Image: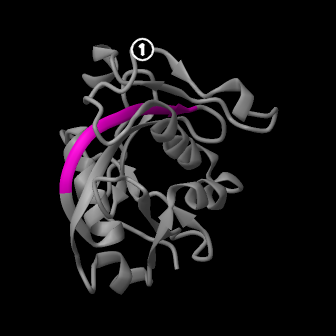
């Protein structure tokens, strides 16, 4: 069953990108186990919880709301991992945060309404699971592994135009832009 929100308004920035927010939800501050949820479109596939921002909603607020709705978890919101752009099939810009889970609900909105499931994965396993059908989600975790550790500061890289490591990409992999320092992106 697909998720349908009758009052949902899609929001776009000045460049026509759909505004989205997501969280990599970790079991502990060690950031070695990440929570994925089943896709509403393809229930046999796993995704990182996230979705569109509502009008006037800040990215961090949207990220926390989305994981509560989709994964049924609450937690301590941490650093902004990056802002990821995807230009291929749908043009969207996603603010991805780190969240340390402190509370897991037994029943939550999407589990009741569409039967959504959730599951903990080791980070390397999650990358493999996501790579075939959600490569941008796998890229979030690769970015985490390559630029951040649980003890790093909110700014994960000294570059403001990060791209995926070319050695990890092939011709079929979409290219993503990730920025953690560009204030123009944050204020869109």
Q: Relative to residue 41, is residue 106 depicted above or below?
A: below
Left or right of residue 133: residue 163: left
Render colour scheme: one colour
What residue sits 43% from the left and 56% below the top? 32
Q: How many marks?
A: 1
How many other residues sit within 10 Å of disc 1, few (<14), some (14-19) or many (≥20)? some
Residue 151 in the image: x percent, y percent? 28, 37
What residue sits 46% from the left and 57% below the top? 48
- The residues colored magenta run 76-86
Residue most toward the right? 171
Left or right of residue 148: residue 62: left
Our reading of the magenta stretch's main secondary structure is strand
Residue 145 in the image: x percent, y percent? 49, 40
- Assign a secondary structure to mark 1: loop
Q: Relative to residue 4, is residue 152 depicted above or below?
A: above
User: What residue is shown with label 1?
Assistant: 160
State which quarter of the image contains the C terminus.
Answer: top left
* Quarter of the image where one finds residue 95: top left
What residue sits 33% from the left and 17% below the top? 181
Residue 184 in the image: x percent, y percent? 31, 15
What residue sits 60% from the left and 61% below the top? 125
* Depth order, front residue of 64/58: 64
Q: Is residue 110 magenta?
A: no
Residue 28 in the image: x percent, y percent? 29, 60
Left or right of residue 93: residue 165: right
* Depth order, front residue of 89/103: 103
């Amino acid at each position: 069953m697909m998720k349908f929100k009758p009052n949902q308004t899609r929001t776009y920035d000045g460049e026509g990108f759909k505004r989205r927010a997501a969280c990599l939800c970790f079991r502990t501050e060690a950031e070695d186990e990440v929570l994925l949820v089943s896709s509403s479109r393809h229930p046999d596939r796993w995704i990182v919880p996230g979705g569109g921002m509502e009008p006037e909603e800040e990215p961090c607020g949207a990220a926390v709301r989305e994981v509560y709705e989709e994964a049924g978890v609450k937690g301590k919101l941490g650093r902004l991992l990056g802002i990821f752009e995807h230009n291929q099939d749908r043009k969207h810009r996603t603010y991805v945060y780190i969240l340390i889970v402190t509370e897991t609900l037994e029943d939550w909105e999407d589990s009741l309404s569409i039967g959504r499931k959730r599951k903990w994965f080791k980070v390397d396993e999650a990358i493999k699971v996501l790579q075939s059908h959600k490569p941008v989600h796998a890229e979030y975790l690769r970015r985490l592994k390559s630029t951040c550790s649980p003890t790093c500061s909110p700014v994960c890289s000294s570059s403001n135009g990060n791209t995926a490591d070319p050695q990890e990409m092939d011709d079929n992999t979409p290219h993503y832009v990730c920025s953690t320092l560009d204030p123009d992106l944050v204020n869109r």
